[in-house]
Amino acid sequence: QQPVQSPQAVILREGEDAVINCSSSKALYSVHWYRQKHGEAPVFLMILLKGGEQKGHDKISASFNEKKQQSSLYLTASQLSYSGTYFCGTDQGGSEKLVFGKGTKLTVNP
Amino acid sequence: NAGVTQTPKFRVLKTGQSMTLLCAQDMNHEYMYWYRQDPGMGLRLIHYSVGEGTTAKGEVPDGYNVSRLKKQNFLLGLESAAPSQTSVYFCASSYGTAVKAFFGQGTRLTVV
């Protein structure tokens, strides 16, 4: 069962912030975040493990609330290069499967 | 350092034909996955493998078969292609589910 991402799409102006959410009906052991540019393969951003941690690099960070079975990706002071589709991936219930959501399309305009 | 390599990159099939997509990784990863990507549907897991000689069904396995005879290779087969299998197929590999997965560049398959 795919995790649920919201919103489906978001349009920003350069410098604005965005939050992308990922939730699951099953317990999560890890949450992955990837970004995909049009016509390219998904690229790894970060992974959060069970324990309610928060990670980040540069102006992109994420949190993981295992009790609520959800994760959020935070993009601050967005840049044109942030445009793409963001996917969260989860191993629901500690399974060996890595299942992705439907994605959130982010467009950053000048 | 090749990473994950998918062959072929593009293919056009006629309905009813069969074909095999090859995924090869040189990172000694145990886990390998096959996904299909369709507009608005995200990445959907077809089949996966957690080691040489093992395979398991994902979320959308119907119409596909897989084999993992060698650790570095994961093959996806279409026995009798249908237009509904027109998609972009991605292979990924990793050491496990709680670590980074590496994706291949994708195979664009069109079934006419």
Image: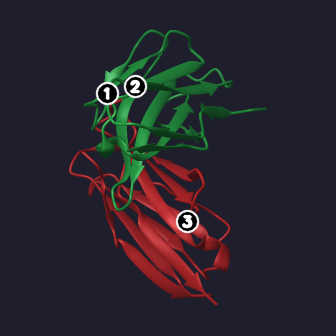
Chain colours: A red, B green
Q: Nearer the viewer, residue A57 or A2?
A: A2
Residue under pointer 3: A61
Q: Position of residue B46 (x, y in %)?
A: 35, 34
Q: Nearer the viewer, residue A12 or B65?
A: B65
Quadrant (top left, top right, bottom left, bottom right) of the C terminus of chain B: top left
Contact, mark 1 vs mark 2 (Cβ under 8 Å): yes
Q: Is residue B66 above or below residue A87?
A: above
Q: Nearer the viewer, residue A82 or B13?
A: B13
Q: Position of residue B33 (x, y in %)?
A: 45, 32
Q: Is residue A28 left or right of residue A107?
A: left
Kindly tell me whether residue B34 is visible in this rendering.
yes
Give amino acid for label 2.
Ser
Task: Give the CA separation, mark 3 to mark 1.
Answer: 44 Å
Q: Residues within 10 Å of mark 2 (few under 14, many from 20)?
A: few
Give SS at disc 3: strand
Give amino acid for label 3.
Ser
Q: Nearer the viewer, residue B38 or A17?
A: B38
Residue under pointer 2: B18
Tell me the residue at 64%/20% (across/down). B28
Image mark for residue B80 = 1
Tell me the residue at 33%/36% (across/down). B15
Quadrant (top left, top right, bottom left, bottom right) of the N terminus of chain B: top right
